[in-house]
Structure formats: structure tokens, C-alpha cells
Image (cartoon, rainbow, N blue to C red):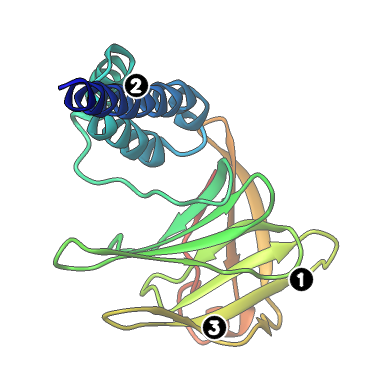
Amino acid sequence: MLIVALGTFGLVQGQVSAERAKENTSRVLASSIEDMVDEDPGRAALAAIAAYRVAPTQEAVSALLQRYEALKETAWMLSGFQGQIMNTAVSADGSLLFGVSAGGRGTLFHHQAGGKVLRRHLGLPGNLTFPLVSRDGRRIAYMVDGAGALQWHDVRLTGRDIVLGSAQRLPGAGLAKFTLGGGTAATASCPSRRAAGGSPPWTPMAG
């Protein structure tokens, strides 16, 4: 009888310890969410859901409700930028978005017709600034700190990936900077295309 009682006690203690470990993990996750909100609101929302699923502690419930209140009017959200996002550019139909973080890292997002979003961290050398996207979403361009010239890539969108072509310079292109809504913006164009009666191939970018 004593052996059975000790075995039962040990089992109960183990269950209590496991439950407390889950609650501690949930609280740690919930407490880290505030630091994610400004940099990546989508990741903060996912962390709130994860904290609640681990254990529905008071802290997890509060964090989940706060994220719901902040995002309840949002149709869809991009997540996974490499640091706080500083500037973005988007194709005319909104399907391709090119974002540059405060650390100069570039990320591409493709919003597919079915609602799925593909993401690609570009891993390009240098600190990227002034992202640009062509109207049809088939090319991206950007400046690199210290380079003094626009770089561009062809972009090919597949059902499973965003394929980036090799880096090229944009011959004869100019980069015009202007102010838009209190932020910095830019547009690039190729003089040869203008001479032929074409419109500038790059859409404006607002930061």
C-alpha cells in the first residue's frame, strides 16, 4: 500500500511540475511580445497565439486580446522582415512587395491569388536603400550605400518560390528623391525609354 501511495504521489508531482513548466514558458513568451510589436507585428501575433496554446495563463490571455484588438481590422499581414522595416515598394497590382529593413536587408513578398504569401530574404551584399518595383512586378531595383548606382534584378514568380535574377546596373537611370507624407520617397526612370515615348519603368516608392 505504501509503495502504491508513493507511486501515486510521484506521478501527481510530476504532472504538477510539467504544468508549472508550461505556465512559465507561456509567461516568458507573453512577456517577449511587446518587444516584437514595432519590429514585426505579425510575429508578435503568432507569439501571442503560441503562448496561449502552451498554457492559457493570465499573461497569455492578455497578450492575445491586445494583439486581436490591434489587428482585428487587418485583412492580411506580412511577417518576417529582417529587422524593423524602413522603406517599401509595391507592384501596380499589389502582388509583389519589396521591403528594406533598418539594417539594409531586403525581403520580397509575393501575395498569390489564392491568398498564400511567399517570402524570400534576398541576402544581397551591402546596405540596401530606396527599394523600387516595376509596375508589372517583374523587376526590382535599389541603391546600395556607397555604390552610387542603381542595381536591378529580374524577378520570376512561381507557385512555390520567388526566383531572383543576377544583379545588373541600370544604364542611364536617374533616381529622384522627394518628400511624401513626411517620409522619403524615390522614383527611377530610364531616359532612353522616355525618348521612345514610354513611361518610366519603375513605380514610386514611399518610405
- Other residues around mark 3 within 10 Å, as few (<14) / some (14–19) / many (≥20): few
Whether residue 176 sits left or right of residue 112 in the image: it is right
7 w.r.t. 147: above or below: above
Residue kind at label 3, given as amino acid type: Arg
Q: Nearer the viewer, mark 1 or mark 2?
A: 2
Residue 19 image-quadrant placement: top left
Q: Tell me which residue sits at (30%, 79%) in the image.
A: 160
Residue under pointer 1? 149
Which quadrant is the N terminus positioned in?
A: top left
Whether residue 170 sits left or right of residue 7 in the image: it is right
Residue kind at label 1, given as amino acid type: Ala
Q: Nearer the viewer, mark 3 or mark 2?
A: 2
Q: Secondary structure at mark 1?
A: loop
Residue 76 in the image: state x and y as whole percent: 24, 46
In-front residue for pair 147/180: 147
185 w.r.t. 27: above or below: below
Residue under pointer 2? 20
Q: Earlier in the sequence, mark 3 or mark 2?
A: 2
Residue under pointer 3? 193
Q: Tell me which residue sits at (59%, 54%) in the image.
A: 186
- Other residues around mark 1 within 10 Å, as few (<14) / some (14–19) / many (≥20): some
The residues bearing labels 1 and 3 have C-alpha atoms spaced at a distance of 18 Å
- Other residues around mark 2 within 10 Å, as few (<14) / some (14–19) / many (≥20): few
Residue 46 image-quadrant placement: top left
Whether residue 200 sits left or right of residue 51 in the image: it is right
